[in-house]
Image (cartoon, rainbow, N blue to C red):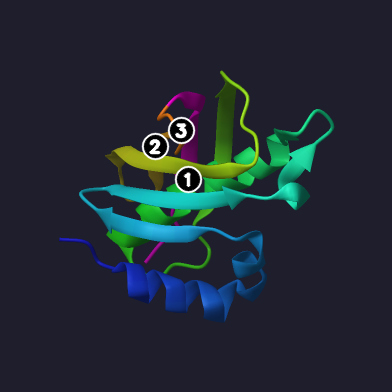
Amino acid sequence: MAKMTVEEIERFMDASVPQARSFGWVLERVGDMSARVRLPVVREHLRPGDTASGPTLFALVDTAMYFAVLSEIGPQALALTTNCNINFLRRAKEGDVIADAKLLKLGQRLAVGEVFVRRAEDDAVIAHATLTYSIPPA
């Protein structure tokens, strides 16, 4: 069972990282060492060519993995990304994208996982990322 629910993570984020909400993400679910985050890609997220920018997709995958980690370890503001590798596979334009994060290994000091980002309109995978998170000592 998850240590934090969607509602608890949202409250935690509002208190500890209040600017994060301005990005526009919607946390849809957590559980089973995973998290799903939806992002409505709007004009502000686009780069020239009307494509979602790399920094936008990085922020989405990092946020989704953070939520997966929090759901398992509880409210740890100092859990942080130590590595992220993203392969951009297809173009993302305006419209919703969905990031599904899954923890592959959760240890006492490190968490390793992957995130698939899909276009909501056709379920096409637009990016795949692997991330490592550092977990602070309890």
Task: Give the magenta part as a residue range.
Answer: 124-138
Instruction: Tell me, for residue 133, which label it has, or none.
Output: 1
Name the quadrant containing residue 16. bottom right
- Which residue is painted at 57% across and 21% down in the image? 87
The Cα atoms of the two marked residues, 2 and 1, are separated by: 6 Å
Residue carrying label 2: 112
Name the quadrant containing residue 107. top left
* SS class, disc 2: strand
Q: Is residue 16 magenta?
A: no
Kindly tell me whether residue 133 is visible in this rendering.
yes
Instruction: Tell me, for residue 118, which label it has, or none.
Output: 3
Determine whether label 2 and label 1 are within 8 Å by CB. yes
Whole-percent x, y for residue 103 in the image: 32, 40
Kindly tell me whether residue 81 is visible in this rendering.
no
Q: Nearer the viewer, residue 61 or 53?
A: 53
Q: Is residue 64 left or right of residue 34?
A: right
Q: Amino acid at mark 2?
A: Val
Q: Amino acid at mark 3?
A: Arg
Q: Nearer the viewer, residue 68 or 134?
A: 68
- Which residue is painted at 46% across and 33% down in the image? 118
Earlier residue among tags 3 and 1: 3
The Cα atoms of the two marked residues, 3 and 1, are separated by: 22 Å
Whole-percent x, y for residue 80 in the image: 54, 53
Q: Main secondary structure of the magenta part?
A: strand
Determine whether label 3 and label 1 are within 8 Å by CB. no
